[in-house]
Image: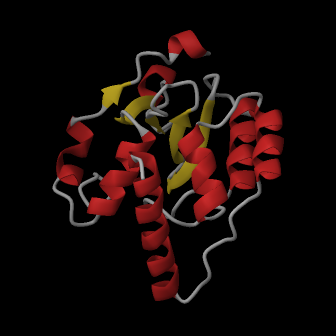
Amino acid sequence: MNENEQLLEQVADRARTSARAQGKPLPTPLGTGEIVRAEDILGFPLPPLLARLYTRVGDGGFGPEQGLLPLRRAVEAHRAQLRSGWRWPEGVLPVADLGCAVYACVDCRSATAQVLLFDPNPGEPDLAWSVDTPSLAGWLRGWLDGTAWFCEDSDAGEAYDLEQVPWTEFRSRI
C-alpha cells in the first residue's frame, strides 16, 4: 500500500468514526462520471488525491473544520468567486468553508495540490491569499494527527496569524 492509499484509509476511518459519533451518515462517495462532469464545468482537472477523497471516502462532510464541501458546492463556490468582485486565480478550487468568507482552497495546478487560504476580509487582493499547507496530503495529515492550526488542541493555532505566508503566485494566475 503506497503513502496516499494509506492516507486515504486513515481519512476514511476517521470520517466514518466522526459520522457515527455525530449520528449522521457519511455522504455517499461520488462516481468517476461526477468527477469528470465537475472537471468539465471547472475547466481543469482535480488533483488525484482530491478526486479519490470524493470517490473513495465520501462527497464531503469530513475533514478539517466543517469538512470538505460536497463537490457540487465546491464547484458552485468556484463559479460564485469568478462572478464576484475578486479576481480568482486559475485552477484554484474552494474545498472548505472556514466561515467569515474564508475558504481553504486547493491549487489544482500545483504538483502537490497545495492548500491555500483565501481571506478577503483585509480587503486587498494581495493580502487575501496565503499558503496554508504545501500539500493536500500534509493538510489532511495535520487534521488526522491534530497538529494543524485549525485543530482545537494544536499549539500551531496560537501563532497562526504570525505565520501566514503570502501566496506569491497569485498575481501570475489571475
Answer yes or no: is residue 69 visible: no
Q: Quadrant of the C terminus?
A: top right
Residue, far bottom: 23
Q: Residue at x 77, y 57 (%)?
A: 31
Front residue of 57/91: it is: 57
- Residue 169 locus on image (x, y percent): 47, 16
Q: Residue at x 41, y 16 (%)?
A: 168
Q: Is residue 56 left or right of residue 30?
A: left
Total numbered badges shown on the rendered structure: 0
Q: How is the image coloured?
A: secondary structure
Answer yes or no: is residue 173 visible: yes
Q: In this picture, is 19 found above or below 67?
A: below
Q: Is residue 100 left or right of residue 77?
A: left
- Residue 160 locus on image (x, y percent): 25, 44
Front residue of 26/87: it is: 26
Residue, far front: 1
Q: Residue at x 41, y 55 (%)?
A: 7
Front residue of 60/173: it is: 60
- Residue 122 locus on image (x, y percent): 43, 33
Q: In this picture, is 114 found above or below 143?
A: above
Q: In this picture, is 156 found above or below 168?
A: below
Front residue of 59/10: it is: 10
Q: Residue at x 58, y 15 (%)?
A: 173
Q: Is residue 140 left or right of residue 79?
A: left
Residue, far top: 172
